[in-house]
Image (cartoon, grey):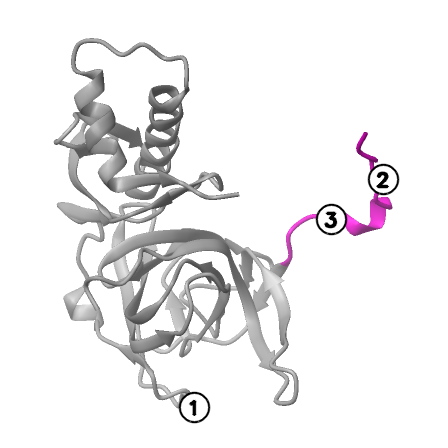
Amino acid sequence: MTNSPVPTVLAMLLCDQVIVDAGTNKKSLIGVFDNLNSVGFPSQTRIAIYAKLTDAEGKYDFRVRIVHLKDETLLGEFEIKGAAFADQLRPAELIIDLPALVFPEAGKYEFQLYANEIYLSRITMEAKSIQG
Amino acid sequence: MGATAILPESLVSEPGTKSSETPARREILPPQEWSDHIVIPILRPKDAANARPESVMFGALRDPRLRLRQPIPLRTEKQGNMISVVWDEIMEFGCGETFSEAVSDFSATIAELFHALTEEDTNLSGELPQTKVILSRYIEARSR
């Protein structure tokens, strides 16, 4: 696993959910967003991450770290063990359906993606308080 | 001669916003009923810690003309409000207000350095030939 090529992230998006068509393997990203509005905090919501990769071949342990950017506090961490990729010349897609997350306050948050402890990419999200 | 495609304005829009009205429970990461068994939460609120690692393996090269042969080991430093990531072997660094911003800055710096050192008519002097050798162990141009 340590000799696997370093994957390159071509795209990384947050959305409500990713639907995979069983017949074609096509992915539909439902509700792509990068802001979260909430009438109050802490706020709980489900989030899916879609990442398109290239250069990946072999097995990887992926890790998603959710970071509160105000003070770079680690809010949560998730691991996907042993994801396998057949051919580094073919782009591949990674879908991570996270369990419901709680964001303690308004502010900017970051989802960082690691593969085999190698930092690959990040995407930020801003949580905002709105009137109910 | 290339053609220019003009996209209808409706194809370009602001990023989406998600709304949450679900009251949160007390836990940062409450027990969940997820269906995908391969996603494993490994941190609980009581373990909450600073997310900035003291060192990291860099794999976030953003230049589409380049690829990494192997990850680059970086050391993290904090000076005042600025975060730096440093590649000690050739003393290159990136900085920013957060760890990820520092890594992004490093990505741009290292790509620019690679291109500058590998231009065909570049005469290298001083430490630059050795820097080029080290860089080439970690980064290569993608074949077209």
Residue B7, placed above or below residue A37 = above
Which chain does the numbered disc 2 sit on?
B
Q: Does residue B11 appear left or right of residue B77 in this picture?
A: right
Q: Residue at x 50, y 64 (%)?
A: A90
The residue segment tinted magenta is: B1-16
* Residue A20 in the image, given as x and y percentages of width and height: 59, 82
Residue beneath label 3, please?
A: B13
Choose between B11 and B33: the one closer to the eye: B11
Q: Amino acid at mark 3?
A: Ser
Q: Earlier in the sequence, mark 1 or mark 3?
A: 3
Residue beneath label 2, please?
A: B6
Q: Residue at x 16, y 15 (%)?
A: B127
* Dominant SS in magenta: loop
Choose between B71 and B101: the one closer to the eye: B71
Q: Amino acid at mark 1?
A: Ser
Q: Earlier in the sequence, mark 1 or mark 2?
A: 2
- SS state under label 1: loop
Residues tagged by mark 2 and mark 3 found on one chain of the structure = yes
Residue B59, placed above or below residue B113 = below
Choose between A77 and A20: the one closer to the eye: A20
| Real-space Cα separation, disc 1 to disc 2, in angstroms | 43 Å
Q: Earlier in the sequence, mark 2 or mark 3?
A: 2
Q: Does residue A29 appear left or right of residue B38 in this picture?
A: right
Q: Quadrant of residue B78?
A: top left
Tell us which disc is closer to us: 2 or 3: 2
Residue beneath label 1, please?
A: B35
